[in-house]
Image (spheres, coloured by chain):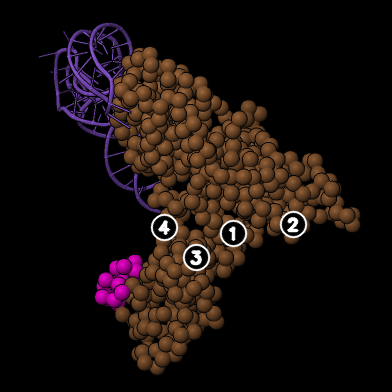
RNA sequence: CGGGGCAUAGCUCAGGGGCAAGAGCGCUGGCCUUGGGAGCCAGAGGUCGCCGGUUCAAAUCCGGCUGCCCCGACCA
């Protein structure tokens, strides 16, 4: 009635197993509990089989996502996983995608890949059918497997090669409409994670060279994440580290530099043998790395060379730099650097450089710096930016670091957390509709490109996040709505007729949401351990107390609250708990 | 793709040129037990990752390969 995935089951019939010993090679909490509780079995690195327990949980998560998608009018479809190379060649992604895209040929020597995402495939579907403005707008979603040949799968289900994803695609007549659709999905995502009882933070994400106007990632904070997120200690500022702004008083720095211009001696070349890195140089000169100006030589995709300067203790963010350059770039290798500068990477500098210079804001804080001399084993000291090398403007191309001043309130300090990306919404615009020629005829008989958006949720990864959030040592308590089983009944001794009868009465009363441990010859300890591992929020124990006092113990595992009720009152108490634990979500 | 580690029973691991291959947990049968993976008895279970080399003799030493784990690089 409440749940489309009925979960009535006896433990003796359930395909479920658990281990007494701790699994090795399980570094994350989610991975450990899932292995110990028999939720998953590793097949190969980054590939897992799910048992009924895990699949029920996954289905319940998918169910919530499905409901919320349907609420905003998104319709469910199913696209193939094996997809022909031609479609990927239309958008150029066949070449752009690296080794993550797994490619192979069929028996007729035609090229295929396993889809890591489905933009091309869904556009191919949509362009076949739609013709007129009357066919728009709409959005489609699917829940299914994706394949990405990850170089290094990690943390069990958190980062796999094959994983379950919900991906949705929206199609609108105009940019304005598409933007509205974007926010509709954004709000739907907030509701989904709220219902899943996960604290997930929407963070403005990098759109970089990929294009599109905006994008948000939905980040779950956990040490097993792979994204770095910057937070402000005072205000609500939050940003991905690679694109995070931070405050530097540029004007004030410039004033200090004016002063330095007259106070600091002119640059002097000094020998600095074997100081190939900033750290070695700082140690050799006995100065902090913040007094060094690092030079990084890059080459854009279109072949332009650029020298980038950043303070020695800072690092260049590829995202920020490619945004300034407005194209992708790569770091020039040692050999090429030498042929241009006549020195190795560690010894190049801006003083004699004639090409394009991009100077990071942090460089302005160096009033008396050290730069490479374009000669192996030599650096210049007493270098003052704007006096000894010139540039028209400064850019923001370096990473924000912990302790930096918040760019928003300018009061708080930034701090860093690792997070896990559970969802991502993109405004795509024309990125796929143009190259794939997805058009419609508008009211004025003009042919126009469809405006798209795409929206993903890592469903299997979200499942792992649930374990990270609600798991403990050898224990997990699932939020009621997604729990594989809502009520776990433990007849301590099933061979005792009274205990057995009462237990089964309860079980039959709640048989669409209850699991009963009807195993005989299994010690109570094992039953309790399995109950802890399998995560039902309500635990019902029928044993000694029934014989002695005619009472049954009911435990709300979430609150830890225990209730001792007579056989007549048990049903009411459980009903009460179910009502209490059921989320107060009325469709909005 | 670099650096490191590991590979012996279903799981966790011990053994370290020579007798029949070892433990705990798990599994099977029996007894006993029933509020936190209890106890006793009896069993089953092995290509010691693969290929090659050294040797009278290799799970053990050497070389190669493969797989897995960790660190890094990478991650629309």
**Mark 1 lies on residue:** A207
**Mark on residue A236?**
3
Q: Residue at x 45, y 62 (%)?
A: A230
Mark 4 closeness class: few <14, some 14–19, many ≥20 residues within 10 Å: some
User: What is the letter of the purple chain?
Assistant: B
Q: Residue at x 48, y 68 (%)?
A: A235
Q: Are marks 3 and 1 on the same chain?
A: yes
Nearer the N terminus, badge 2 or badge 3?
A: 2
Which one is nearer the viewer's eye here, A50 or A341? A50
Tell me: B39 left or right of A426.
left
Nearer the N terminus, badge 3 or badge 1?
A: 1
Nearer the N terminus, badge 4 or badge 1?
A: 1
Q: Quadrant of residue A214?
A: bottom right
Q: CA distance from mark 3 to mark 1?
A: 21 Å
Q: CA distance from mark 4 to mark 1?
A: 21 Å
Nearer the N terminus, badge 2 or badge 4?
A: 2
**Mark on residue A177?**
2
Q: Is residue A161 visible?
A: no
């Amino acid at each position: 009635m409440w749940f489309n995935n009925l979960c009535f089951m006896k433990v003796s019939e359930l395909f479920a197993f658990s281990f007494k010993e701790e699994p090795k090679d399980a570094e994350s909490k989610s991975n450990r509990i899932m292995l110990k509780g028999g939720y998953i079995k590793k097949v190969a690195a980054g590939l897992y089989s799910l048992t009924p327990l895990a699949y029920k949980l996954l289905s319940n998560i998918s169910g919530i996502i499905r409901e919320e998608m349907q609420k905003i009018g998104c319709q469910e479809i199913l696209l193939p996983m094996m997809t022909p190379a031609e479609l990927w060649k239309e958008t150029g992604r066949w070449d752009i995608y690296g080794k993550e895209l797994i490619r192979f040929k069929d028996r007729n020597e035609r090229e295929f890949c396993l889809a890591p995402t489905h933009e091309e495939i869904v556009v191919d579907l949509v362009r076949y059918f739609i013709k007129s403005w009357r066919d728009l707008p709409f959005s489609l979603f699917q829940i299914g497997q994706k394949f990405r040949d990850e170089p290094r799968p990690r943390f069990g289900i958190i980062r796999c090669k094959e994983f379950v994803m919900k991906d949705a695609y929206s199609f609108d007549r105009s940019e304005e409409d598409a933007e509205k659709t974007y926010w509709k999905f954004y709000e739907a995502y907030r509701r989904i994670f709220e219902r899943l009882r996960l604290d997930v933070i929407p963070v403005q994400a990098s759109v970089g060279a990929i294009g599109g106007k905006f994008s948000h990632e939905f980040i779950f904070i956990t040490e097993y994440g792979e994204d770095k997120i910057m937070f402000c200690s005072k205000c609500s500022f939050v940003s991905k580290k690679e694109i995070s702004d931070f405050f530097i008083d540029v004007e004030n720095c410039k004033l200090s530099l004016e002063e330095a211009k007259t106070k600091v001696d002119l640059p002097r070349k000094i020998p600095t043998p074997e100081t190939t890195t900033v750290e070695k140089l700082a140690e050799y000169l006995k100065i902090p790395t913040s007094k060094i100006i690092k030079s990084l030589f890059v080459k854009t995709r279109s072949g332009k060379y650029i020298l980038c300067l950043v303070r020695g203790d800072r690092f260049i963010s590829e995202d920020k730099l490619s945004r300034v350059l407005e194209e992708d770039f790569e770091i020039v290798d040692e050999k090429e650097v030498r042929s241009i500068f006549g020195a190795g990477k560690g010894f190049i500098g801006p003083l004699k450089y004639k090409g394009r210079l991009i100077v990071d804001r942090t460089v302005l804080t160096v009033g008396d710096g050290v730069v490479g001399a374009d000669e192996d084993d030599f650096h210049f000291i007493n270098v003052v930016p704007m006096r000894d090398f010139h540039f028209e403007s400064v850019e923001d191309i370096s990473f924000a670091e912990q302790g930096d001043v918040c760019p928003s309130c300018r009061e708080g300090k930034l701090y860093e957390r690792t997070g896990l990306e559970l969802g991502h919404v993109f405004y795509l615009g024309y990125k796929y509709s143009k190259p794939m020629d997805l058009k419609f005829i508008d009211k004025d008989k003009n042919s126009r490109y469809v405006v798209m958006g795409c929206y993903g949720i890592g469903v299997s990864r979200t499942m792992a996040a649930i374990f990270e959030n609600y798991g403990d040592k050898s224990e997990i308590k699932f939020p009621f709505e997604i729990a594989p089983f809502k009520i776990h009944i433990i007849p301590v001794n099933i061979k005792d007729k009274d205990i057995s009868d009462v237990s089964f009465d309860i079980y039959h009363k709640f048989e669409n949401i209850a699991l009963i441990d009807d195993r005989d010859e299994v010690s109570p300890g094992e039953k309790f351990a399995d109950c802890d591992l399998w995560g039902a929020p309500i635990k019902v124990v029928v044993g000694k107390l029934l014989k002695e006092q005619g009472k049954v113990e009911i435990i709300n595992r979430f609150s830890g609250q225990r209730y001792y009720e007579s056989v007549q009152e048990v049903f009411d108490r459980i009903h009460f708990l179910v009502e209490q634990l059921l989320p107060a979500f009325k469709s909005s």
